[in-house]
Amino acid sequence: MKPLMRPFGFGTMRLPLTDPDNPASIDQAQVNRMADRFLEAGFTYVDTAYMYHNQMSEGAVRQAFVDRYPRDRFVLADKMPVAFVKTADDYPRFFAEQLDRCGVQYFDYYLLHNLSRKSLGLAESTGAFAYMQQLKAEGKILHAGFSYHDTADLLEDLLQKHPEMEFVQLQLNYIDWENELIQARKNYEVCVRYGKPVVVMEPVKGGALADPPEEVRALFHSVDADASPASWAIRFAASLEGVFMVLSGMSNLAQMEDNLSFMRHFQPLGETERSVLDRAVALLQARIAIPCTGCRYCVNHEPGCPMQIAIPEYFGIYNTVKAYGQAWSTTLRYRNLRAEGHGAPGDCIGCGQCESHCPQRIPIIDWLQKLAGMEELMEKGSFPL
């Protein structure tokens, strides 16, 4: 597979919303404007998935791209929701639903979504890899791959067993590069050894690297006053050999314009810039408490958290308080979540479903136990953890 596209893709996991508390309330008018600017700038790769935005992302992509542009103006990637599969019969059912939602006859790139040690066993036992090859033989997908969240040794085993997989989508960013839980560098190096092109997801780690603490901003500004923090993160990923696409989950038109400003005429990072990123990593590692990206895999699986605990939201509140101090808005957000019927952190029964789906391998149960009595801790002014 030769990368024929410019190496910047429109990720649709974090689209703009009309209601920030409702992931299904996609601001379609703004998405359409973002699509226009994306294509006008010469970029083509659009990435979606069955579960994004409470299963509304694929429809938003259809309205923004498929209904408004010829099919040869864009490249469309979608993903089979392996976590939702129970039998082999589910694969054609989900795939037909995805074609209908997107309004297309084929996908340019199609992935088995979120393979890990647990889901890989399910994929193998239900014939997922054989089904992918069937789709390719029928011309319903042009390239078959998978997104991956696990260890490098398992990835190597997977690629040895399934050399027919053409590309791998990995979480790669400068803060996770040497993280032993994420194993970003190690996974990337496995793909390079096996000659598998890499699609990068989470280059700005769920937005965290686009809005870093002030000392990191000051560091970047001292080197290039015009470069946004997001540009440092995305250029890091795009500078890696073997990366043919970097996805950015842009949440508004301003973020789109910023990304286009430095990716339209992309320049790889130089040695001086890499050393600056090393210093930024040291500053950030001193602040991060829970390495949650807000991907929501912990709660978006079947059947979901039995106690309806808003895990990513609680972790986000905690990280905000630890990094930036207590604010009324964080206490209010917690109270709103409880009023909406979400269980409290202390309601966790330790079933482990969330941990088995977490790409970051966060010890979620332990953290929820630490956050028991979260509102009372916030009202005291800080968390003693």
Image (cartoon, rainbow, N blue to C red):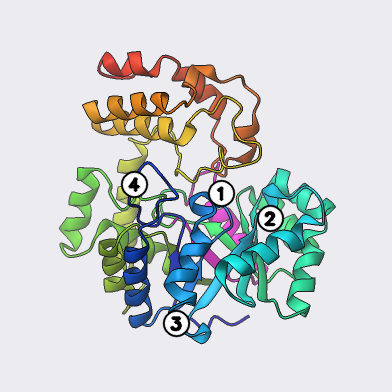
Alpha carbon of mark 1 to alpha carbon of mark 4: how far? 35 Å
Residue 69 tag number: 3
Mark 1–mark 4 contact, CB under 8 Å?
Answer: no
Location of mark 1 (residue): 183
Helix, strand or loop at label 4? It is loop
Helix, strand or loop at label 1? It is loop
**Horizontal side of residue 121 vs 43, given as left or right:** right
Depicted 130 relative to depicted 123: above or below = below
**Horizontal side of residue 74 vs 137, given as left or right:** left
Residue 301 tag number: none
**Horizontal side of residue 214 vs 357, given as left or right:** left
Location of mark 2 (residue): 155
Percent of width and height locating residue 135? 75, 73
The kind of residue on which mark 1 rests is Gln
Alpha carbon of mark 4 to alpha carbon of mark 3: how far? 27 Å
Q: Quadrant of residue 93?
A: bottom right
Which badge, 3 or 1, comes first in the chain's sequence? 3
Location of mark 4 (residue): 19
